[in-house]
């Protein structure tokens, strides 16, 4: 089977979020099953600069964009077992510093969608299936069903569209229609605006999202961001598949970014050394108290309003120490900066991002706090467990699917969780976690248990292959 993944970012080429991690891992896992896998990305400035001497020019052509013909170059490089094709256009991607956030994102990614489909004919690459990802690829299934519907070379191509976060939908003014070479069509519109994601939801052959619980949550208005009605209509075509974790990238046995490498056999020593190193980085006082870590974007959706109302009481009573790595909302930054000044021996903050520091937090903290209001899948809780750091999460999306709540009677579980999005609910489970820390026998058993959890991509890949086969065989 010939499977082509299309998206806007992928590791190791360019990354802003979890989408890049998926497109950096899932195609490789699918390729292990002897399917022919390709990946198409925009030729972002960062990619062209970093892989300048590894790319091969495969040809060029033009496509009409409103009143002009736009250049499309196709660059190629090989990454492990994957053929990577880069859609090159200096104006839309090559000189831009950011891959999102420009005033003409709708035109840029509308161009990308059209260029991908035109490239198939130019290079005679006709996949059995296109696996599309997030709003930046949302028009492709629509173009297939309209502009290409009578082209016999395209008619058998099936589409799978994955929602990585439904909050990001690609919403633009109707004035963009001429730049997309499209006429007004209800399938393109939502609230009288062009909506790339909505377009995919009504035209893709199959819809997936990144955890089973998130797929269920999307049927409710609270989580659906306006799309719950459409998804209810297509519930038979919606499947939740939990994202995996690249166990080679995130492995405490081999991770050179942490102070001491360790595994299940020597985790007590490894966690102790990494905890001391983490405390030294943040200049925290020597202490036997549990150390709670967070690595997160600083946004309301990540549960920070609950943390702000809860954490100081525990610090004041000397129950724990706390470290935070992240950036985002300035008010949230100001709160934790003030907390650091007030409790300098027990609070450490770093505003920004450092992969090395993030890994040290995963390795050195005792607990990992992730009380998200919604979380499609979540990667941080999977990494924390891989490094033997017990997660404290809210029961939503992938957090619910990946963390089994601790049972105080049987001592089963892989972390602590709460359902109701309230400060009291978080405080209760947070206190339970700190109390368990004192019972070293049970706590250490939990560490061993979570380090033996397997969140690798192989199981998820098999579920995707099953979907691909069902679609392709139904031709």
Image (spheres, grey):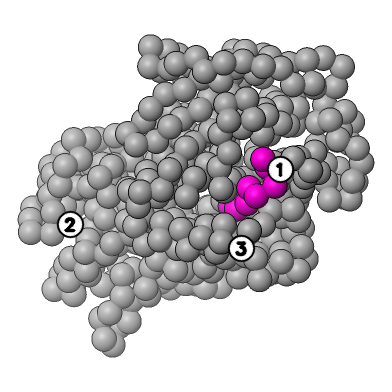
Image point 26% across, 72% down: which residue? 436
SS at mark 2 in the image: loop
> What's the distance in space between the residues labelled 3 and 2, CA to CA?
61 Å
Label 3: few (<14), some (14–19) or many (≥20) C-alpha neighbours in 10 Å? few
**Residue beneath label 3, please?**
474
Q: Can I make out residue 284 in this image?
A: no
> What's the distance in space between the residues labelled 1 and 2, CA to CA?
69 Å
Question: Would residue 115 appear left or right of 230 to someone viewing this image?
Answer: left
First-in-chain label (3 vs 2): 2
- Counting from the top left corner in percent of width and height, residue 71 is at 68, 14
**Residue beneath label 2, please?**
288
Quadrant location of the C terminus?
Answer: bottom right
Image point 41% across, 40% down: which residue? 24
User: Is residue 369 shown in magenta?
Assistant: no
- Counting from the top left corner in percent of width and height, residue 246 is at 32, 48
* Part of the protein shown in magenta: 153-163
Q: Can I make out residue 263 in this image?
A: yes
User: Which of 314/52 is in front?
Assistant: 52
User: Is residue 157 shown in magenta?
Assistant: yes
User: Which of 160/177 is in front?
Assistant: 160
Question: Would residue 255 appear left or right of 359 to someone viewing this image?
Answer: left
Query: Number of labelled discs?
Result: 3
């Amino acid at each position: 089977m010939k499977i082509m993944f299309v998206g806007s970012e992928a590791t190791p080429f360019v990354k802003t979020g979890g989408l890049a991690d998926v497109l950096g891992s899932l195609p490789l896992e699918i390729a292990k099953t002897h399917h022919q896998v390709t990946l198409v990305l925009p030729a972002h400035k960062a990619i062209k600069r970093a892989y300048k001497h590894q790319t091969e020019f495969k040809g060029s052509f033009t496509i009409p964009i409103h009143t002009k013909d736009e250049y499309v170059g196709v660059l190629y490089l090989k990454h492990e077992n994957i053929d990577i094709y880069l859609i090159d256009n200096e104006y839309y991607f090559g000189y831009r510093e950011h891959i999102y956030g420009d005033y003409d994102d709708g035109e840029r990614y509308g161009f990308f969608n059209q260029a991908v489909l035109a490239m198939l004919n130019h290079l005679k690459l006709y996949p059995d299936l296109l696996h599309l990802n997030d709003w930046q690829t949302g028009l492709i299934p629509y173009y297939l069903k309209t502009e290409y519907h009578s082209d016999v070379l395209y008619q058998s191509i099936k589409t799978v569209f994955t929602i990585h976060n439904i909050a990001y939908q690609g919403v633009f003014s109707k004035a963009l229609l001429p730049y997309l070479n499209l006429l007004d069509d209800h399938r393109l519109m939502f609230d009288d605006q062009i909506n790339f994601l909505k377009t995919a939801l009504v035209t893709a052959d199959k819809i997936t999202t990144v955890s089973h619980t998130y797929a269920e949550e999307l049927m409710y208005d609270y989580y659906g961001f306006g799309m719950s009605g459409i998804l209810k209509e297509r519930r038979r075509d919606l499947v939740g598949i939990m994202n995996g974790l690249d166990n080679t990238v995130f492995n405490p046995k081999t991770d050179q970014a942490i102070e001491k490498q360790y595994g299940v056999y020597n985790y007590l020593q490894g966690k102790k050394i990494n905890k001391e190193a983490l405390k030294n980085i943040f200049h925290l006082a020597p202490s036997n108290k549990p150390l709670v870590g967070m690595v997160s974007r600083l946004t309301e959706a990540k549960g920070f309003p609950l943390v702000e109302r809860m954490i100081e009481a525990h610090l004041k009573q000397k129950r724990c120490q706390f470290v935070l790595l992240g950036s985002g909302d300035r008010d949230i930054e100001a709160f934790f900066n003030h907390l650091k000044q007030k409790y300098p021996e027990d609070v450490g903050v770093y505003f920004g991002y450092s992969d090395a520091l993030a890994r040290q937090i995963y390795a050195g903290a005792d607990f990992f706090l992730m009380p998200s209001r919604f979380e499609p899948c979540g990667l941080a809780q999977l990494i924390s467990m891989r490094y033997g750091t017990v997660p404290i999460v809210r029961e939503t999306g992938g957090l619910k699917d990946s963390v089994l709540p601790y049972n105080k009677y049987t001592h089963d579980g892989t972390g602590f969780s709460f359902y109701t999005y309230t400060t009291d609910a978080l405080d209760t489970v947070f206190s339970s976690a700190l109390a368990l820390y004192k019972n070293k026998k049970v706590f250490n058993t939990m560490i061993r248990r979570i380090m033996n959890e397997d969140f690798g991509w192989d199981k998820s890949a098999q579920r995707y292959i099953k979907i691909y086969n069902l679609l392709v065989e139904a031709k």
